[in-house]
Amino acid sequence: QVQLVESGGGVVQPGGSLRLSCAASGFTFSSYGMHWVRQAPGKGLEWVAFVSYDGRTKFYADSVMGRFTISRDNSRNTLYLQMNSLRAEDTAVYYCAKENYDLDYWGQGTLVTVSS
Amino acid sequence: QAGLTQPPSVSKGLRQTATLTCTGNSNNVGNQGAAWLQQHQGHPPKLLSYRKNNRPSGISERFSASRSGNTASLTITGLQPEDEADYYCSAWDSSLSAWVFGGGTRLTVL
């Protein structure tokens, strides 16, 4: 069965950096585009970034453009999100999601807290 | 990036029918439709319906999606206590090159 397991969350000071990982199993990772979506405490879902199956195409939300970088390692079945220049408003649970036309499987999420 | 518009809350009685709406524009919902996700408190979202209005395997037939112009709808029949959750619509916006979500509708089953 499809499994997506995020890791790398934690507490970081404003201006700091963090790298999230998403380990995928149960499907052919290299055949599917992948997304990061976040959810601030008590708020709705916010799309963050997308990477195509081969890593060549990437899209970002305006709110993270230039600060976050999405990437993938198909040999390791792992998706990444490098987050730099973090702000308080980046505090959220970050989910990775598999795309099969739509976001059909989601991980359990990892919490990122940006606070001094 | 502009999101999709959903009513913040809907309340219906047990075994009744609820219809949730999601309004976008011709670049997103009006173009390829909207997918629907269900999220219970403390859990990740779960896909209920693809943008083509078909259900993933294992999703109850009580959930059905449709679209008219720039507005997508999710109809839930025979409401059960476990249907109480937050429901989000989502779509790809071709003009923004971005995925957009609605603000979510909290469904309360009375």
Image: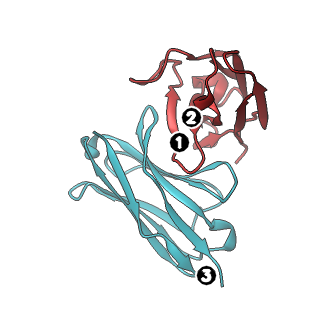
Which residue is labeled 3 in the image?
A: A15
Vertical relation: A15 (above or below) B14: below
Assign a secondary structure to mark 2: strand
Q: CA distance from mark 2 to mark 3?
A: 33 Å
Residue beneath label 1, please? B45
Q: Do labels 1 and 2 touch, CB within 8 Å?
A: yes
Residue B68: x %, y % from top left: 69, 14
Q: Secondary structure at mark 1?
A: loop
Label 3 amino acid? Gly
Question: Quick check: can you spot residue A21?
Answer: yes
Mark 2 vs 3: CB contact within 8 A? no
For chain B, give the colour.
red
Residue labelled with disc 2: B37
Q: Chain of mark 1?
A: B
Q: Which one of the lettered chains is coloured cyan?
A: A
x%, y% of residue B28?
Answer: 64, 31
Coloring scheme of the render?
by chain
